[in-house]
Structures are given as C-alpha cells and as structure tokens.
C-alpha cells in the first residue's frame, strides 16, 4: 500500500520561480489537505478539498493555489515563490466520518533562495 | 478562534522514566482533541484522540491522555518511555463546525520534542 505519495521530496527554487507540488492517494479518500510545517510553528493548513470538485482555504492560503484534479490527486502550486515559503510541505488525506484519521505523506522540503 | 499551547518545546527524559507532555487549548465551543506523533523524516501519525465519551483515551503503545474541560487541558502521559518514543509530538484541536466538514481542519500546537536517553 503506497498510501499518500508526494513528489518531489526536495526542491530548491529561486525567488519568483513557480512550481507545483504533487500529491496522490490510493485509499479512495474523499478529503485531501496541504499543510506547511515551519520550525517552532507546528503545522498550518494551507488549503483543503473536502471532496472531489471542491477546495477551501485554510489558515495560510496566501501565495498558493490548489487543484483537485480527480479523487486521487491534489496539487499545490506556488506561482511566484518567495523566501517566506521555504518550508516542509505535507499532503494528507482522510475518509469521511468522525472516526476517520489523517494519513500523511512523507513531505516535500522546499527552499526558496 | 481556537488555539493550542504546548508548554514545553523540548522534554528530555531517561529510558523507563515517566513523561508528561502538556497541552492546553482555548475555545468558546465544544472541542475535539488529538495527539499526533512525528518520527524523524516522516509525516505525522495519529496517536490518540478525544471526540466524546470517556475523558481518558489510550493508544496502543502505552500513551494516554485525559480531557480536562475545567482546566482546558489534554496532557499526554506515559508511565515508562522507550528509546523508540523519541519523536516530536503535536497536540491539535478542532470543533464540530470545522471537524464535521473535514477531518483535517485542525489547529496544531507548535510541537514538543521528546528525547529519550539511555
């Protein structure tokens, strides 16, 4: 079982460059999420998709866009990267229901110079 | 708005000693509470959660947490830690409005790094 797969694992960008982080899950989950993790800050929700065809802003959406391509895939795009977006990005998914839990990918370490 | 405070950023303990990782929350409505664990270079994993019912919840690897509404706390405890418990632990909170719509709509604390020494 692959679970939640994120690509790439590492990326270095220059300020102003754009890139897309990819995420796919094979658990037939309805909901998918993007978080960023910064030292001493915990995880903060960027965007989420409660079901295919819907997306909603989380706590820190500015500077990001998302696409729920289909039920399996949820991508995060940085249109013009800034040093403040240097972070570790995690994708997660969950089923629907109160007893469902989050399944996390292994993360993408992004540095913006 | 909800918030979570993890009072200790780092907790060093010796193997087989007891440990308590503290978590306090603030919310004007009823809450759901979670502890997640992150091992080095991995994503987070759910350790335990309180949604309703018994205020004492337990994980399969010996951790437990008690929801204390009057003290707005959800401290994590283990009576005897192992080297393998070395990880970062995150407390998280949600409410019916946010959690009911999406299980990942959580507010996370800043994390506590547990370091177990031999």
Image: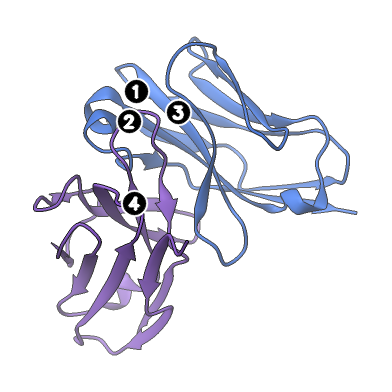
Circles 4 and 2 on the same chain: no
| CA distance for labels 1 and 4 | 25 Å
A68 w.r.t. B99: above or below:
below
Q: Nearer the viewer, residue A101 or B10?
A: A101
Circles 3 and 4 on the same chain: no
Q: Could you tell me if the residues under marks 1 and 2 are in contact, i.e. CB atoms within 8 Å?
A: yes
- The chain identifier of the residue carrying mark 1 reads B
For disc 1, the marked residue is B27
Q: Could you tell me if the residues under marks 3 and 4 are in contact, i.e. CB atoms within 8 Å?
A: no
| CA distance for labels 4 and 2 | 22 Å
Mark 4 residue element: strand
For disc 2, the marked residue is B2
| CA distance for labels 3 and 2 | 12 Å
The numbered mark, 1 or 3, whose residue comes first in the sequence reads 1
Mark 3 residue element: strand
Q: Residue at x 16, y 80 (%)?
A: A80
- Classify 10 Å Cα crowding around label 4: few (below 14), some (14-19), many (20 and above): many
Q: Name the spot of residue B9 as percent of width and height, x first.
A: 61, 48
- The chain identifier of the residue carrying mark 4 reads A
Q: Name the spot of residue B47 as percent of width and height, x first.
A: 57, 39
Q: Please tell me whether mark 1 or mark 4 is closer to you in this view.
A: 4
| CA distance for labels 3 and 4 | 18 Å
Q: Residue at x 49, y 61 (%)?
A: A39
| CA distance for labels 1 and 3 | 11 Å
Name the image colouring: by chain
For disc 3, the marked residue is B33
| CA distance for labels 1 and 2 | 5 Å
Q: In purple, which chain?
A: A
């Amino acid at each position: 079982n692959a679970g939640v797969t994120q690509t790439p694992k590492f990326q270095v960008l220059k300020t102003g460059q754009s890139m897309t982080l990819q995420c796919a899950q094979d658990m037939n989950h309805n909901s998918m999420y993007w978080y960023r993790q910064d030292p001493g800050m915990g995880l903060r929700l960027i965007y989420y998709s409660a079901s295919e065809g819907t997306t909603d802003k989380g706590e820190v959406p500015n500077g990001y866009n998302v696409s729920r391509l289909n039920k399996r895939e949820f991508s995060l795009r940085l249109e013009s990267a800034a040093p403040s977006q240097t972070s570790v990005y995690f994708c997660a998914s969950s089923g629907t229901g109160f007893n469902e839990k989050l399944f996390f990918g292994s993360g993408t370490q992004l540095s913006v110079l | 708005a909800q918030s979570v405070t993890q009072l200790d950023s780092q907790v060093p303990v010796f193997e087989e000693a007891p440990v308590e990782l503290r978590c306090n929350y603030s919310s004007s409505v009823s809450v759901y509470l979670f502890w997640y664990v992150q091992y080095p270079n991995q994503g987070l994993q759910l350790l335990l959660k309180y949604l309703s019912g018994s205020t004492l919840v337990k994980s399969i690897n010996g951790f437990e947490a008690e929801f204390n509404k009057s003290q707005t706390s959800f401290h994590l405890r283990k009576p005897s830690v192992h080297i393998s418990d070395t990880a970062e632990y995150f407390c998280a909170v949600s409410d019916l409005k946010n959690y009911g719509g999406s299980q990942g709509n959580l507010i996370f604390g800043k994390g506590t790094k547990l370091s177990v020494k031999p």
